[in-house]
Amino acid sequence: MTRRVVLIADSPADDFRLMGSLLGALSEAGAMTELFTDGSAGLHSVIRGKADLVVVDLDTPSLGGLDALIQIGRIASRIPVLLLTAEDSKARRMWAVGAGVAGYVTKPVDEQALARFVSKLLKGF
């Protein structure tokens, strides 16, 4: 069964390798991945359709507001959400735990470990 994964990321060039690795890992795990570079469009796609996993790069410029965090929290109550971020603040981690996200990964990340984590999340269905 193919899993639908929504990846929301507007990554700068230095994150391109990470996103390429993540897309490869998702593909190897049998996922059909939709990439959104506009955070609002990605969140609306998740709300409108069924997704098995949502991977959100919180450093995406269009996700900087409180409204985006609220929407992610609502989504996380129904669908596993994996957050990627360069910011490792206590407040953001506490919010992520409170929102019920499946994982919180700071960049730079170990790409192989991230691939294993994503594969494990997808196999949990």
Image (spheres, rainbow, N blue to C red):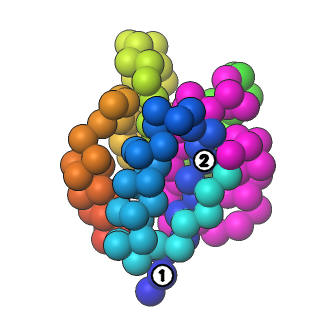
Residue 107's x, y, as percent? Answer: 37, 30
Q: Amino acid at mark 2?
A: Ile
Choose top left, top right, bottom left or bottom right for residue 118. Answer: bottom left
Residue 74's x, y, as percent? Answer: 62, 43
Q: Nearer the viewer, residue 9 or 51?
A: 9
Residue located at (62% from left, 33% from top): 60
Residue located at (54% from left, 43% from top): 56
The answer to whether residue 62 is magenta is yes
Residue 10's x, y, as percent? Answer: 62, 39
Residue 100 shows up from this direction: no
Residue located at (40% from left, 77% from top): 30
Tag 1: Cα neighbours inside 10 Å, few (<14), some, or many (≥20)?
Answer: few
In the image: residue 34, left or right of residue 120:
right
Residue located at (35% from left, 63% from top): 25
The residue that label 1 is drawn on is 2
In the image: residue 67, left or right of residue 121:
right
Residue occupying the far top of the picture: 90
Vertical placement of 60 versus 82: above or below?
Answer: above
Q: Amino acid at mark 1?
A: Thr
Magenta-drawn segment: 37-64
The residue that label 2 is drawn on is 8
Choose top left, top right, bottom left or bottom right for residue 1. Answer: bottom left
Element type where label 1 sits in the image: loop
